[in-house]
Amino acid sequence: MAKEDYYELLGVDKSVTEEELKKAYRKKAIQYHPDKNPGNKEAEETFKKVSEAYEVLKDPDKRAAYDRYGHAAFAQGGAAGPRGPGGFHDPFDIFREVFSQGGGGGGGIFEQMFGAGNGRDSGHDGADLRYDLEITLEEAARGVEKEISFRKLVECERCHGNGAEPGSKRVTCPTCRGAGQIRRSGGIITFTQTCPTCGGTGTRIEKPCTQCRGEGRSAKTTKLTVRIPAGVETGSRLRSGGNGEAGVQGGSAGDLYIVLSVSEHEVFERQGDSLFCEIPIKFTLATLGGTIEVPTLSGKASLKIPPATQSGTTFRLRGKGMPHLRDGSQGDQLVRVQVEVPTSLTAEQRKALENFAQLSGDADQPVGRSFFEKAKKFF
C-alpha cells in the first residue's frame, strides 16, 4: 500500500514555510493525539503519520531528499533516514519537543495538556550576576587587582538554605500528596498542573524560617577581589564561577560576570594593541631636526625627529603599546607630530624670518612647487 504524501498529511503545499509547517503539525497533533482520542486506533495511526511527516519536512536536508526521491529516500537500502535507514523517532518525543516550553517542573504546554512529567522540582540554580567595572588605561596595560562590593542572594545562615525554621522540617504537601502536580479534568482532556501549594516540590515547610521567610536565601553585601589580567579592553568579560546568587533547595550557585570598560585617556588613544598620541613640535625642530622626549605608559622615551619633518608625520615606537591579552606580546605606540606655527612674533623674530624667506625664495614662490606644477593650468 502506497504511503500518503507528507505534505497532504499535514494539509500544506510544498512552498510551506518553517513556521507554517510547525503550526500545521500542532493543529493535526492535537486533533489526533491518543489522549484526546482514547481507544481510537485510526486516530493513533494518523497521529504517528503526521509526526513522521513533520519530522522529515522540518529538516531542510531530509525535506530536500523527500522532494527529490519521495518515500524511497528513507526506505531500507536507500538514503539514511532520521534514525538510520527508514527509522523515525518516537512520535510522542516529537510532540513533546514542539509543545514543551522548557520542560522540567510541569510548566510547558505539553505537560499542561497531557500530563507528562512528575512535576517535582529538584532545585533551581542561582541566577548569574553582572558587575560593570571601569578601569584606567594604565591598569589595563599592566593588570590590576580590584576589590568589588555588591549585593546578592546567599544561603540563609539561619536555616542553611532549606527554608525551615531550626527544629522544624519539611512535610509532604497535603494538596498533591507529594506528587508535585495536581490533575484537573477539562472535558475529554485531563490537565496536569504544577501544585500551587508546594510549587512542584511535593513538600512544604512546616514552619518557615523567620529570617528568610522560607526562601532559603537572604540578601547580603559581598566583597570580592578580582584579578584583571594585562591587555583587557572595553567589553572584556571575566567570569567568577559560583559567585552569583545562591541556588534554591540544593541548586548550584550562579556565576558572576565582570564586564570591563576602559576609561578614556587624556593623552593616548587605543586601537587594539596599538596606542596613538599626537605631539605638537616647533617649526624650527621640524626644519632642523632633533630629539624629543615623548610620554609612554611605561615612562619617557626618546624620539628622533629628522630634518624637514612634515606636519602629520607618524613615528613608531616598537613595544610601547598595549600587551596582547592572550600571548603577552607587546603592541606599538604611534606618535603623530603636528608642526606648530608661531602666532605672535617679536620685531627681531619677524625680521629674521623675512630674511629667511628672501634667502630661500619663499617670498617669490610661497606655494610649494609640487602643488604649483599640478595646479598651474588653473592660473
Image (cartoon, rainbow, N blue to C red):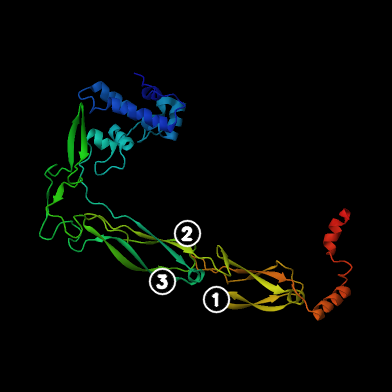
| Helix, strand or loop under label 1 | loop
- Which image quadrant for residue 280? bottom right
| Helix, strand or loop under label 3 | strand
Q: Is residue 20 above or below residue 329?
A: above
Percent position (x, y) of residue 240? 36, 62
Q: Going 72% across and 68% down the picture, which residue do you hit?
A: 311
Residue type indicated by callout 1: Ser
- Which image quadrant for residue 9? top left
Q: Assess disc 2: are there few (<14), some (14-19) or many (≥20) residues with their C-alpha within 10 Å of its C-alpha.
A: few
Residue type indicated by callout 3: Glu
Marks 1 and 3 sit apart, C-alpha to C-alpha, by 19 Å
Quadrant location of the C terminus? bottom right
Describe residue 78's horizontal placement relative to residue 345 as left or right: left
Callout 1–callout 3 Cβ contact below 8 Å: no
Q: Going 45% across and 27% down the picture, which residue do you hit?
A: 67
Q: Residue tagged by mark 1?
A: 298
Callout 2–callout 3 Cβ contact below 8 Å: no
- Which image quadrant for residue 128? bottom left
Residue type indicated by callout 2: Gly
- Of the numbered discs 1 and 3, the one sitting upstream in the chain is 3
Q: Residue tagged by mark 2?
A: 235
Q: Residue tagged by mark 3?
A: 145
- Of the numbered discs 2 and 3, the one sitting upstream in the chain is 3
Q: Is residue 243 above or below residue 341?
A: above
> Does residue 63 appear in the picture of this structure?
yes
Describe residue 347's horizontal placement relative to residue 127 as left or right: right
Percent position (x, y) of residue 239? 38, 61
